[in-house]
Amino acid sequence: MTIINAATFEITEIDAHGIERGTVEVTIGATTRRVRASRFENCLTAGEMFGRYKTSAKAWPATVYQRVSNGKISESAIFGRDDRSGRFNKMNYIFFV
């Protein structure tokens, strides 16, 4: 299940590089919000979220990326340090403020 509802993406502008900017609905748990988003080719990004590591109280600004490749949708969250550990799934630790 994805948290970004790509069908709700509304374009407000297209920049000189062809990047579409606007808003999209994101659902985390039982909460759905419309947040800033951008789309270029097969990647949709959504912001206005935060992430937190299990061992820390610090909240980091988070971005969720949704990619479509060969008809398959995948999502990943980026926040804090760049640790590509397979033991920690950042998608499980994002939230709205």
Image (tube, helix red, strand yellow):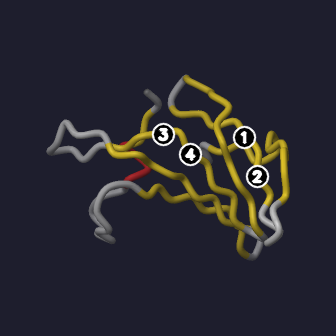
Any mark on residue 24, and which? 1
Q: Mark 3 points at which residue?
A: 49
**For the residue marked with disc 4, what is the amino acid?**
Gly
Q: Mark 4 points at which residue?
A: 47
Residue 49 place in picture, x, y as percent: 48, 39
Q: Are marks 4 and 1 in contact (CB under 8 Å)?
A: no
Left or right, 76 with respect to 86, comes to right
Q: Residue at x 43, y 27 (%)?
A: 97
| Labels 2 and 3: the sequence-earlier one | 2
Any mark on residue 21, and which? 2
Instruction: Count residues near mark 3 (Cα–Cα under 10 Å), then give few for <14, some for 14-19, many for 20+.
Output: many
For marks 4 and 2, give the CA distance. 12 Å
For marks 1 and 2, give the CA distance. 10 Å
**For the residue marked with disc 3, what is the amino acid?**
Met
Vertical position of residue 19 compared to residue 33: above or below? below
**For the residue marked with disc 2, what is the amino acid?**
Arg
| Labels 1 and 3: the sequence-earlier one | 1
**For the residue marked with disc 1, what is the amino acid?**
Val
